[in-house]
Image (tube, coloured by chain):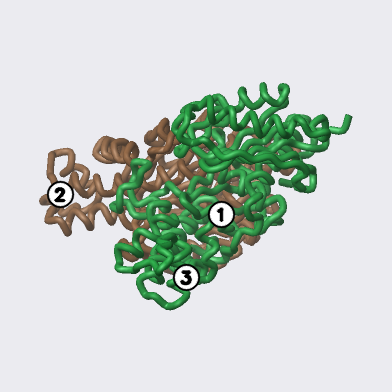
Chain colours: A green, B brown
Amino acid sequence: MHTDLVTALDIGGTKIAGALVDGSGTLLVRAQRPTPARESGERVMEAVGEVLAELTASPLWGRASAVGIGSAGPVDASAGTVSPVNVPGWRDFPLVERVSRAAGGLPVELVGDGVAMTAAEHWLGAARGYDNALCMVVSTGVGGGLVLGGTLRPGPSGNAGHIGHISVDLDGDPCPCGSRGCVERIASGPNIARRALEGGWRPGQDGDASAAAVAVAARAGDAVAVASFERAAQALAAGIAATATLVEIDIAVIGGGVAGAGDVLFAPLRSALRRYATLSFVQQLTVTPAVMGNDAGLVGAAAAAFAARAGADGAVPVQV
Amino acid sequence: MHTDLVTALDIGGTKIAGALVDGSGTLLVRAQRPTPARESGERVMEAVGEVLAELTASPLWGRASAVGIGSAGPVDASAGTVSPVNVPGWRDFPLVERVSRAAGGLPVELVGDGVAMTAAEHWLGAARGYDNALCMVVSTGVGGGLVLGGTLRPGPSGNAGHIGHISVDLDGDPCPCGSRGCVERIASGPNIARRALEGGWRPGQDGDASAAAVAVAARAGDAVAVASFERAAQALAAGIAATATLVEIDIAVIGGGVAGAGDVLFAPLRSALRRYATLSFVQQLTVTPAVMGNDAGLVGAAAAAFAARAGADGAVPVQV
């Protein structure tokens, strides 16, 4: 029997995606359901079960030897549980045990969604070939993950690299996490839009008041829109510089909807990074957009599963 | 020939200390010189040479198989050079090559002083038995180092864990490093004293305007002195919480003169940490004083040398 595939699950507040993935990162079979995020935990698990059922029905299923899960956080990889902020029905939900049971007893590797995205960018994306990298998603929230010394570093609980909730403004606005002045509180899409609206920016006739609309205005020269992106860039720069100063990274990769703003974000970000990343050993730090797109979660979950499988076999881990 | 010892060098802006150290961390032979910090780089190297000459004159010298150096930073372990802020005569100074030559060609391991202190606390001190730890020195400056996954993580350049220069106040006061609102700019001893003086605190008849004197006043109930330590504690808490959120540490160990303030620092620090370390995977974080004292630099430099030697031999690394 060939066991050259893994099963990947990408679990977020909006959708639950699954795939059978081969050793080159190709998604061979896909399945997807909307996340019934406001319903009971069992109902959410039913949706996961439906995704898995589609995958197990594939003639390729027999070649899958492990399951990788990238989940909205926080996760607890040591306990095998998840408590996604946007899925209130899951609190310390035993996702690893439930998925393993639904997958016929296959071993399951659980990481946070930021760590999964990082695994994908390091395996096949913008961080490929870098031994020390921070990868981030800047979207409704801000998440991330770390590659240190050439390997993914999920941390004991699977949450390492959670840059969205480090404080870069210790007296700043309260964050829903309970802290103040977190990177996410300043740089997430909703906060870019909120700040623009507070500064007097108004959406066009289509009524679109999202960060993407603020980005369009910024590109057209609207000073308030530009300033809101500059403030987000400043917070991201302080957070990225802090990470580099703490763990010595060579590259920061940024994906997610807000990164889609392009130079509106990246130009002030690179400028601000020169002001915050001042020590000799962090001055060479590069910032670059992510390249893995919407499949990063699935590819990264697969990468985590391949790496865990290789480690468990005592074999040389695949380059993840 | 026994080769069960290493040579340790602890190089700071005030003194250059050396020792022959055995596998239990005992300092068998010591030597020390003041650092001629304002003189030429060659004159500083002469002082290092005098320390080494005393050690090589010992009958135990023949048992030393490697040299470990903990140096004021920044250091560049990959290039073997150091550029200590407080020793202007050394800029990209080739310390590894010069020490190796003076030590008869022994292999040399270079790390920053914060990393050396961390190696000591993890080997024999307050971080012993912890797989994931941040150790810090809060003194004239603020430095640190990381243990991740059970092993010292100096980073490629030997500077990882440099928590003193992460910004926790992105709009804050300019820091000599070029950034703003760095932990050191708020929490170092000189800044604790400066803030107290600016707030109206005045030294006693002895004229002592140091952070230690502010700590005495705080213990006696002086509100301005208490507030200055609380502000330092807040910055340290934000920095420690950021580190825990990024790399998942179980313990933060704090040494250096400012830590000598005891509860004046640690009580508000633990309180502030609860406000900044809010995510589930960082809430259990412990903060504790360092225990290795003035010899931490030498013991840690020895630990780094033992670890490097074990790695180079292909042997099982000593538990460092």
The residue indicated by pointer 3 is A216
Mark nearer the viewer, 2 or 1: 1
- The amino acid type, in three-letter code, at marker 3 is Val
Above-or-below relation of A187 to A86: below
Please indicate, yes or no, whether residue A82 appears anywhere in the rendered image.
yes
> In the depicted view, which residue is nearer to us: A206 or B51?
A206
Q: Residues within 10 Å of mark 1 (few under 14, many from 20)?
A: many
Mark nearer the viewer, 2 or 3: 3
Q: In the rendered image, which quarter contains the N terminus of chain B?
A: top right
- The amino acid type, in three-letter code, at marker 2 is Val
> Residue A227: percent from the left, percent from the top?
37, 70
The residue indicated by pointer 1 is A248
The residue indicated by pointer 2 is B224
Q: Residues within 10 Å of mark 3 (few under 14, many from 20)?
A: some
Q: State left or right for residue A216 relative to residue B233.
A: right
Please indicate, yes or no, whether residue B41 appears anywhere in the rendered image.
no
> Residue A38: percent from the left, percent from the top?
45, 34
> Residue B270: percent from the left, percent from the top?
32, 36
Q: Which subunit holds the residue at mark 3?
A: A
Local SS, label 2: helix
Distance CA(mark 3)–CA(mark 1): 34 Å
